[in-house]
Image (cartoon, rainbow, N blue to C red):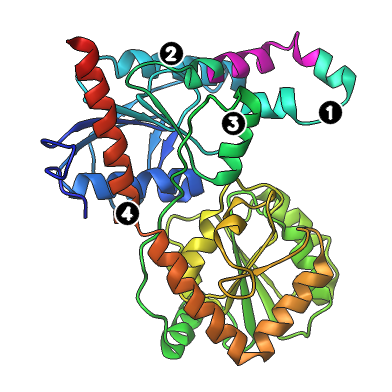
């Protein structure tokens, strides 16, 4: 665990952490913040959370300063109001302001999603849509916030959570923007025995027999649920699917699937307690259509599950694994036939499962949370040195 007295950090720091919602159940980006702050708080640093919402089920009790923004405003105005109020709330009194939000308050600005400028000024789109973006108050607000967020200044750093995001930032703002990559981390879970898996399935009301594929997502449609359902139709009846985080769109998608598929799908609403579902599953499927990184498959590896992924650029995590050695990687997220074949291979090939399990241990070692926290502490130290030099 990083020590507050480690090289470059002379004493425990006072850190303001700014995020929309603080809690593991809100998504991968949010879970990144929770676990990073858990490591820093355990090392003795004083962390205060600034957010709209704080989920106590995350198991981390930190001082919380709510930033209230009325839901009656359109989303783009809410983002602007949040950014302005966060900047005021964190002004002074903190050694480091660490932000995961679009705005200008942070000394450290962590970019989790496709940059706005990349989406609207680099990525191809129709001429009409691009022209309309120049007169859209929504797009212009997001672009303006992001421009302030990444603008170079002393005592400021932009961090990308994946090589994919760093590449997109460079394309959007030029190679002069220095954005080091600090990918999400993971904690090693206790090994899952066959007995524990049986017990978890019984406790969750899941079938005792069959191959249980798992998909955990706040928005299962974006994470490839339709592709998984198509693959399920090509597989034997004892291949089952468990979707954790099922929303209305996911339930509607499953309801329209053939009965032979529908009866093999188990839906669970969003929850902060996902461990039992990882412990109950046999493998993890992640044919995502849009993930700058993808924390869920990394978490699945920590529970010993073999993982099937979309390739980059649809899944940033694919850049961090060796195909066939650490995970199975599809050629395209919508290739249901490839997904079905990969699931079939994992069912029948014990040597493949063992190889992926061994490879996953290397992935987990590279993404241990103490190492992630150490890298942020080094960035904090650089910022404090810059600030001290500027004050002289």
Query: Which image quarter holds the C terminus?
Result: top left
Q: Is residue 278 left or right of residue 120?
A: left
Camera-side residue of 117 and 28? 117
The alpha-carbon separation of the residues under discs 2 and 3 comes to: 23 Å
Q: Which residues are magenta?
A: 132-146
Cβ atoms under marks 2 and 3 closer than 8 Å = no
Q: Which residue is mark 3?
A: 169
Question: How would you rate the neighbour count of disc 2 (Cα within 10 Å): few for under 14, some for 14-19, many for 20 or more?
Answer: some
Mark 2 vs mark 4, foreground winner is 4
Cβ atoms under marks 3 and 4 closer than 8 Å = no
Return the x and y of residue 321 as percentages of the image width and height.
56, 64
Query: Which image quarter holds the N terminus?
Result: bottom left
Q: Note whether residue 127 is visible.
A: yes
Return the x and y of residue 280 as percentages of the image width and height.
50, 77
Q: Secondary structure at mark 3?
A: helix
Q: Which residue is mark 2?
A: 84
Mark 2 vs mark 3, foreground winner is 3
The quadrant where residue 132 appears: top right
Question: How would you rate the neighbour count of disc 4 (Cα within 10 Å): few for under 14, some for 14-19, many for 20 or more?
Answer: some
Q: Is residue 99 left or right of residue 5?
A: right
Camera-side residue of 2 and 390? 390
Return the x and y of residue 232 as percentages of the image width and height.
77, 74
The answer to which of marks 2 and 3 sits earlier in the sequence is 2
Mark 1 vs mark 4, foreground winner is 4
The answer to which of marks 3 and 4 sits earlier in the sequence is 3
The quadrant where residue 275 appears: bottom left
């Amino acid at each position: 665990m990083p020590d507050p007295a480690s090289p470059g950090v002379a004493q425990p720091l006072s850190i303001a952490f700014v995020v929309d919602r603080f809690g593991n159940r809100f998504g991968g980006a949010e879970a990144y913040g929770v676990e990073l702050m858990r490591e820093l708080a355990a090392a003795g640093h004083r962390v205060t959370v600034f957010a709209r919402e704080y989920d106590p089920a995350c198991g981390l009790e930190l001082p919380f300063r709510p930033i209230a923004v009325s839901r009656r405003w359109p989303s783009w105005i809410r983002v602007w109001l949040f950014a302005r109020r966060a900047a005021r709330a964190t002004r002074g009194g903190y050694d480091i302001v660490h932000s995961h939000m679009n705005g200008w308050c942070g000394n450290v600005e962590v970019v989790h999603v496709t940059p706005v400028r990349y989406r609207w000024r680099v990525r191809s789109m129709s001429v009409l849509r691009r022209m309309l973006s120049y007169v859209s108050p929504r797009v212009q607000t997001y672009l303006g916030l992001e421009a302030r967020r990444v603008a170079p200044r002393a005592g400021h750093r932009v961090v990308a959570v994946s090589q994919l995001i760093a590449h997109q930032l460079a394309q959007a703002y030029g190679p002069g923007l220095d954005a080091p990559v600090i990918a999400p981390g993971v904690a090693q879970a206790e090994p899952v025995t066959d007995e524990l898996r049986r017990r978890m399935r019984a406790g969750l009301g899941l079938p005792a027999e069959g191959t249980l594929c798992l998909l955990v997502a706040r928005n299962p449609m974006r994470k490839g649920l339709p592709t998984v359902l198509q693959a399920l139709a090509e597989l034997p009846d004892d291949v089952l699917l468990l979707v954790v985080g099922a929303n209305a769109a996911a339930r509607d998608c499953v309801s329209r699937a053939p009965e032979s598929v529908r009866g093999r799908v188990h839906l669970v609403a969003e929850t902060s307690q996902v461990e039992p579902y990882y412990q109950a599953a046999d493998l993890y499927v992640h044919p995502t259509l849009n993930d700058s990184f993808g924390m869920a498959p990394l978490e699945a590896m920590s529970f010993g599950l073999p993982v099937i992924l979309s390739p980059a650029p649809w899944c940033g995590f694919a850049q961090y694994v060796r195909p066939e050695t650490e995970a199975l990687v599809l050629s395209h997220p919508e290739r249901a036939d490839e997904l079905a074949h990969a699931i079939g291979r994992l069912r029948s090939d014990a040597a493949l499962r063992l190889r992926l399990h061994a490879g996953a241990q290397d992935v987990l070692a590279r993404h241990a949370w103490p190492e992630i926290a150490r890298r942020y502490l080094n960035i904090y130290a650089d910022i404090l040195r810059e600030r001290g030099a500027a004050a002289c």
